[in-house]
Image (cartoon, helix red, strand yellow):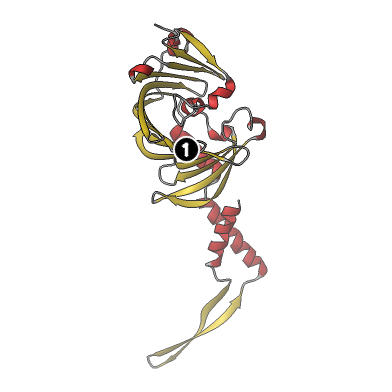
């Protein structure tokens, strides 16, 4: 609200609260003289003018929730199918991994790694709040404990939660529009999100988030992810997107884990399909453990 009030004051400052109008006109041949008389605006008129200015500013300003709604419309889908390539840089060494992924709402997700050869056949299945991993050499699915979901996925800077999450942010966070900024020469809204108290420790991986939302395309060009202690944990940037239907969907994301040194992961999404029918068998343990 303070951000909108500041805008209102700036607009109000451009209006003069005293008017100068020409009231007499004297003619002498072809010469004209204009005399100005000063009029004062009454207190009631001043208040009316401020109210009109305030309503005018509000008609153009967006709230944080309205902006997040537009972000969610771009980034949260009913279903998704995609191919992905991860480039992991750790201490100067670069590794690449490829996998296919499926999402269904915020409850179900499936990942299967296809390259390199040592990772081929490694699979992950998320069903609600539970997740399993299948390793070909073990030939049996193992449940991943809840606290492990925030750990690194296959040595990358992304966690299991980062990769399989598909939730609307406004369901988990209080949202504040705190200003504007420019990132990579793009004008952005700056939002701060704080976890709702009932969800602060149980249902979110990051207690506080700062998002730089591209004003034109409505997705977070940059995001900082914080722990409850205030420590910066991760930073993400979106450097490319694809128009899919009515969505501006991110296809190139860089994640930097600030708790590790000299590390980053680039995620490239390809052949993305949204809001399609996904066979029910994919989100089952039998499909996870298939030989």
- Measured from the top left, where is residue 200 in percent x and y? 63, 33
- Measured from the top left, where is residue 9 in percent x and y? 57, 62
Quadrant of residue 135 in the image? Answer: top left
Q: Is residue 148 above or below residue 186?
A: above
Foreground pick, 108 / 276: 108
Foreground pick, 262 / 288: 262
Near mark 1 (Cα within 10 A), the count class, few <14, some 14-19 or many ≥20, is few
Query: Would you say residue 125 is visible in this rendering?
Result: yes
Residue 9 located left or right of residue 187: right
Quadrant of residue 31 in the image? Answer: bottom left
Residue at the (62%, 66%) spot, across then down: 46
Residue 56 located left or right of residue 287: right
Q: Secondary structure at mark 1?
A: loop
Q: Which residue is mark 1?
A: 261
Residue at the (46%, 7%) spot, across then down: 286
Quadrant location, the C terminus: top left
- Measured from the top left, where is residue 20 in percent x and y? 53, 78
- Measured from the top left, where is residue 203 in percent x and y? 60, 28
Residue at the (58%, 24%) spot, across then down: 147
Q: Is residue 264 above or below residue 118?
A: below
């Amino acid at each position: 609200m303070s951000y909108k009030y500041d805008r209102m004051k700036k607009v109000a400052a451009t209006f003069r609260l005293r008017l100068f109008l020409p009231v007499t006109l004297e003619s002498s041949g072809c010469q004209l003289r204009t005399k100005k008389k000063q009029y004062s605006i009454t207190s009631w008129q001043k208040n009316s003018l401020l109210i009109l200015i305030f309503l005018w500013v509000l008609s153009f300003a967006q709230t944080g929730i309205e902006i997040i709604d537009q972000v969610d419309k771009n980034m949260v889908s009913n279903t998704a199918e995609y191919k992905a390539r991860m480039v992991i840089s750790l201490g100067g060494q670069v590794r690449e991994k490829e996998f296919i992924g499926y999402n269904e709402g915020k409850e179900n997700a499936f990942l299967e790694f296809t390259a390199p050869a040592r990772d081929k056949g490694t699979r992950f299945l998320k069903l609600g709040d539970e997740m399993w991993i299948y390793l070909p050499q073990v030939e049996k699915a193992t449940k991943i404990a809840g606290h492990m979901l925030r750990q690194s996925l296959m040595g990358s800077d992304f966690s299991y939660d980062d990769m399989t999450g598909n939730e609307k942010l406004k369901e988990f966070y209080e949202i504040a529009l705190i200003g504007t900024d420019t990132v990579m020469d793009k004008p952005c809204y700056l939002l701060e999100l704080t976890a709702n108290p009932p969800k602060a420790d149980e249902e979110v991986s990051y207690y506080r988030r700062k998002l730089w939302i591209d004003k034109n395309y409505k997705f977070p060009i940059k995001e900082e992810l914080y722990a409850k202690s205030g420590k910066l944990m991760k930073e993400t940037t979106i450097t490319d997107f694809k128009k899919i239907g009515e969505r501006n969907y991110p296809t190139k994301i860089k994640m930097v884990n600030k708790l590790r040194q000299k590390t980053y992961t680039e995620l490239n999404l390809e052949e993305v399909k949204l809001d399609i029918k996904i066979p029910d068998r994919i989100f089952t343990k039998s499909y996870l453990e298939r030989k």
